[in-house]
Amino acid sequence: MKTNKRYFAKSKQLIFACLLFLGALLLLESCKKSSTEPVDSVRGPSENVAPGRRDYVWTMDTLESHGEPLYMIKLWGSAPNDVWAVGTGASELVLWHYDGNKWETNLGTEQSTMFSAIYGFSQNDVWAAGDGGIIWHYTGSWHQSASLQPEGFPRGLSFEDIWGPSPNEIYAVGAAQNSEGYPHAMIWKYNGAKWDSISVPELCVYFKDIRIPTGTNDLLLAGVSEMPGSTTYYVYVKTGNEFRKLYEGTEVAHIITVDGQYLVHIDRRLFCYSDGRLLLWKDFSNILQYPLFFPRNANDIFSLNHNGLLHWNGTDVSVLYPLDMYIGKPALFEKEVFFLFKDFYLSTGSRYNMILHGKLKD
């Protein structure tokens, strides 16, 4: 009997030790999978960079709509003397170009397209997309590349982003509306000759951004679902035929470029994508007040609040230009920057789309 008691006591100790060991392994694995805490091995953009300069000379240009409705959304450019602006409104005014001296419109796309997306590879290789599933291509002049109408979605297709790693691999994302008006997430791919749809699960989401993280073949996507009384943001990754959700929440989520790397921007935190996970790289919650900011690098970040356009240089935040409201994605170059603003407070009561242009002093 004494022998049996000692045997069972030792057995319990052995089982307990095994359980502790398994528990430690599980804890270690859960820490590895965490995407909400900083991880030492995250290889984000370099932080060993000089503070961003602030000695800009600013000018403001107005995109005159002559009383027609106009809401500009995005900017893209191959150089400071080749910048495009797109938006929605009067059909002949939704596309503008800056040649280094002035902004011009009436550029050959006078039809019903409302643009929400623009991207290019060079001065004469630019793509734009928006409502109606229509994609335009600029090769010295604008022409319609495709009119994409997926079956089973009578209310049409709207694109929110167009991007590609090369001219022969371009993606357009957004959503198509079914007969009841609900969105269905959509991805289309151009292979250099034609556009084809990519299979997507039934997601009631508008995809807003798409990128391929460096060193992977994965598609990283950010989107939003807007329902009466609620707005939810998402981040997904498509690896082969597998679709996985990386984030769901009420904090704004986008994909942005920081020093040549694609990062996920959730509220005021920046995450690197690594091995199918989002790993926290930087948290600016105690530095920047609003969840809308655009970095060149870790020490050269543009943001905004009620005071206007702000700048973080790695040490402090300073107001660069006082303005009431900012809209759309900017175009950032090495020594020049372009920001879209909309002035709601002019004495005439009109609403003007304005381009704030900053040049660093020589």
Image (cartoon, helix red, strand yellow):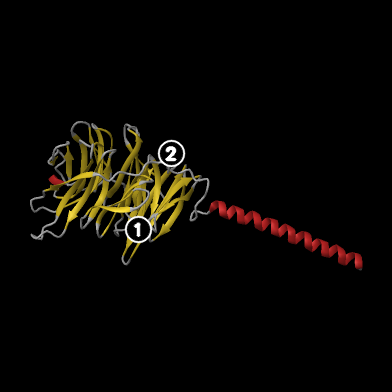
Where disc 2 sits, the SS reads loop
Label number found at residue 30: none
* In the image, residue 18 above or below residue 150: below
Check disc 2 and give the amino acid type: Thr
As drawn, 170 above or below 35: above
- Using a 10 Å C-alpha cutoff, classify the residue at mark 2 as few (fewer than 14 neighbours), some (14 to 19) or many (20 or more): few
For disc 1, the neighbor class at 10 Å (few under 14, some 14 to 19, many from 20) is some
Residue position for label 1: 225
101 left or right of 310 in image: left
Pick whichever, 213 or 56, lies toward us.
56
Q: Is residue 260 left or right of residue 110?
A: right
Can residue 199 be seen?
A: no
Q: Position of residue 215 (x, y in %)?
A: 46, 37
- Residue at horizontal 37%, vertical 56%? 287
The first of marks 2 and 1 along the sequence is: 2
SS for dot 1? strand
C-alpha span from label 2 to label 1: 27 Å
